[in-house]
Amino acid sequence: MLLYKNYRKDIKKQDGNFMASNYNFFKDATYIEQVSRSNSWGHHFIFLNLLLALFSSLSYIYASPSTNNFISFFYLIVTYFGHTSFLFAIIFLCLYFPLAFIGNYRYYRVILVFISVILHTILLFDIKLYLTVKTHLSLTTLNLMLTSLDFKTGLNYNFLYIAIPIIIGLELLFAKFTTKFIYKTHHSKAYDYVGMFFFACFITSHALHIWGDAVGYDKITTLRTVFPAHYPTTAKTFLMSHGYIDNNNIKDIENSTFKLKYPLSKIEYGKHSNVSNVFYININGLSFNDINENKQSKLYELMNENHNFTNFYLPYESFYDNLFATTYSLPAKNRDSILEQDIVPVVLSLMQRQEFKIKMFTSKDLDINLIKDNTNLMSYQIYDFKSDNESIEKFKDAILAMNENDSHFYTLFLNDLAKDNLSQKEYNKKFKVLDDKITSLVNFINEKNEGRECIIVISSLKGNEFYKNNNEVYQRQKLHVPMFFMSNQHNMKNITSFIASSYDLAPTIAETVLKVKSKSQDYSIGNNLINLNNRDFIISDKPSLLLISSDFTTVYLENGHSFIESNKVKQEVKPNLEDLIKSMQILNRFKE
């Protein structure tokens, strides 16, 4: 290293400006000297990059699950320092150090600047992904983003246009500062102390994790996937990070509120060409299998003569949860936030702007206050009567009294089939009565709306209790309900086998009747039933996370395990992280 010492003396003679020296180190230095200089430079350069990464990684702490005690917070902090420094130690040993042996100090610096820019860009991309969907870059997420064109990560890729130039500028600054620094100073013991601190953090974090995992202390194990490449994301940790699991129990998501942005953007719509009337008839207590040819049902003929959805499923067992899903086209976990922020459903808001007359008719079997909470209707818009028969008659009277120049949206809830403790014989008798009444009501509506655009929707928000199976998490046969449309202005004679749900009614009315031009994703988690495309599943967030497909239901349990329910048979399956990411994106679409 004699040549290197002479070179340092020569530099000092030039008033501290080593670049003023005419001595060409790169030309005369040996291979070993070039490698030695490259290694020394690389150590200082990666230290500056570690500081930058620590600054960026503060975002992971910001987005991490709640740490409401000292131990979990301490674990998060020591993991932040220990794991980040460990990653950079691995990068140095596996990448920066081997590249030093190219034996060219100048090329080595250029290569490391280029690599560092790429690594920090990947880190920023991972941070944005974690902030959005609580997962990190992996083969699974990359495959999902590349293959699923409708996978909305929430990433604003435009941020890279600003971030990358900043990173490049910082890396060039680091490179220049490091080059000057290694010529002017000797090794400092401060680096030893910093290295000892990072090593202590690394050991402490892993010791705490081993203890937390051994005793089942979830306040620590929940945090193990906060940082990238720390521990692999599992179904359990993924659900924990989204707040669905707390101390091995499903959280009571009904009692949690969060800020919602609903809709996501201003809703654009055109004016409908003529007066439009929509009649939504719900026969609660009716499931799809109740309407069949063997019963010689008039509803069966009516269903097959119009636009019929053979795979329509309710996401929830509760009538009021399904009413909320139908009205807002949002999961039930959003209800408390909706009530707290007093948010009006998009469809209701648009109907009010277009001066629709909105009324709801029901019997005493339903709680008016709960109806108001789940629809945002006013008391004067809800009419309750003693029986279904009286409700139907008052519904007819309201149709007769309609102003021909106004548009109307009338809802009718029939609850005779949903009464408790009905025998099968009593159920069949009531069904026969309703079968005749509904057919007569449909004919009455069409007769009184001749010459005006009229859409009739018939469905159910509560399935038949006789199909309940206590061994199933999701009551598939019970919650498989009829859904069919009829219109005097549109050709709606089609049978659709694509899976559909209550979430789809709001965007259907919005686009078909209210002429909404905005994407349905901006105000709902459903799709337009008229132009329905195939999809993998619909989602329910109660009693646990359920992914309901056409042939089976995937159930994610509080312990992170999952199984499939199909034909009353349960089969344990490996959790599908791609499906979990998709479902969380849908469920959290409007969460700020």
Image (tube, grey):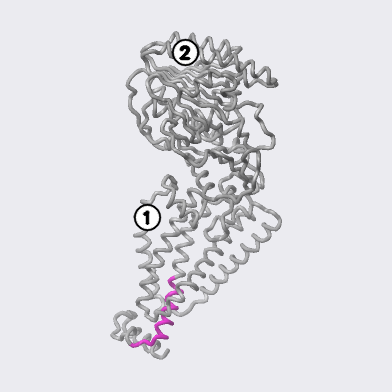
Residue 41: in magenta span:
yes
Mark 1 to mark 2 CA distance (whole Å): 60 Å
SS of the residue under disc 2: helix
Q: Which mark is residue 373?
A: none
Where's the N terminus, which quadrant? bottom left
Residue 235, percent from left and from top: 59, 50
- Of residue 502 and residue 534, the one placed in the foreground of this image is 534
Q: Residues within 10 Å of mark 1 (few under 14, many from 20)?
A: some
Classify 212 as above or below 298.
below
Classify 495 as above or below 405.
below
Residue corresponding to mark 1: 160
Residue 438: in magenta span:
no
- Of residue 538 and residue 224, the one placed in the foreground of this image is 538
Identify the residue at image location x=54%, y=38%: 550
Residue corresponding to mark 2: 443
Q: How many marks?
A: 2
Q: Which residues are magenta?
A: 28-45
Which of the 4 image quarters holds residue 421?
A: top right
